[in-house]
Amino acid sequence: VGWSVRPPAWAPDGVSLLVAGVVGPQPIDGTSPQTDLFVIGLDGKVAERLTFGGASEPDWAVDGTIAFVRGGQIQLMRRGAGWRQLTWRGGSAPSWAPDAKRLAFVRGDQVWRVRLDGRSPRQLTRRGGTSPAWSPDGRRIAFIRPQPEVDGLWIMRADGKAPRFTGKEGGPQGYSSVGGPAWAALAPRWGAR
């Protein structure tokens, strides 16, 4: 089993990772290989295979719910239980809000947000967006906006308002949408009491 390009998702308990693993041979026609979801321990050993028949782009919520992509739609599951379809008109790159009550995702090269009941999906961007990532406090979403010369890193409020361009550093080609942005939780300064 080889691992996909998307970064692994940490388990809520912090002792394992969720990854999309390549199963079967690499197609010779240039299409993507089939992947399924695997839980691996911190030692790198596969602990459990969660899906069969294709699944990718996993993200693990703090309540243990797993979002992933199958058949071009966002699906939700819990370990040891079945899965259910969340989106019906396409979706990729799921990203959980810190409270595990909302999910940001990509549909049609735009960032969207949806509640866990699947009702009332809301388009948050209008000029393109990929790779959404929630801030640790759940108030903002970072995303990559493809641009003609170089992709840019943007941040907006969780309701989609006030998008702000943060820059295009990251090398001569700008930011990569592979893996996307990740937030760092703020910690007290060294020596601060």
Image: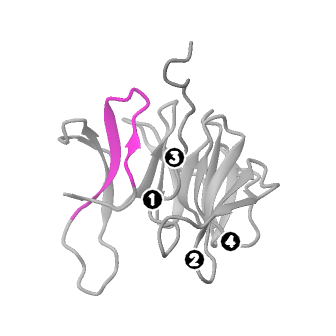
Dot 1: few (<14), some (14–19), or many (≥20) neighbours within 10 Å? some
- The residue depicted at 32 percent of the width and 29 percent of the height is 15
Which structural element holds mark 3? strand
Give the quadrant of the N terminus: bottom left
Residue 142 image offset from top left, x and y in percent: 63, 53
Which structural element holds mark 4? loop
| Mark 2 / mark 4, whichever is N-terminal | 4
Contact between marks 2 and 1 (CB within 8 A): the answer is no
Among all residues in the image, which is located at the extreme front? 191
**Numbered disc in front, either 3 or 1:** 1
Contact between marks 1 and 4 (CB within 8 A): the answer is no
| Mark 3 / mark 1, whichever is N-terminal | 3
Whole-angstrom CA distance, mark 2 to mark 4, is: 13 Å
Give the quadrant of the C terminus: top right
The label number, if any, that marks residue 76 in the structure image:
3
Residue bearing mark 2: 150
Left or right, residue 176 beside residue 129: left
Q: Considering only vertical position in the picture, is 98 above or below 38?
A: above
Q: Mark 1 belongs to which amino acid?
A: Gly
Whole-angstrom CA distance, mark 2 to mark 1, is: 17 Å
| Mark 3 / mark 2, whichever is N-terminal | 3
For the record, the magenta segment spans 7-23
- Is any atom of residue 87 visible in this view? no
Q: Mark 4 belongs to which amino acid?
A: Gly
Q: Foreground residue, 52 or 112?
A: 112
Residue bearing mark 4: 128
Q: In which image quadrant can residue 82 be found?
A: top left
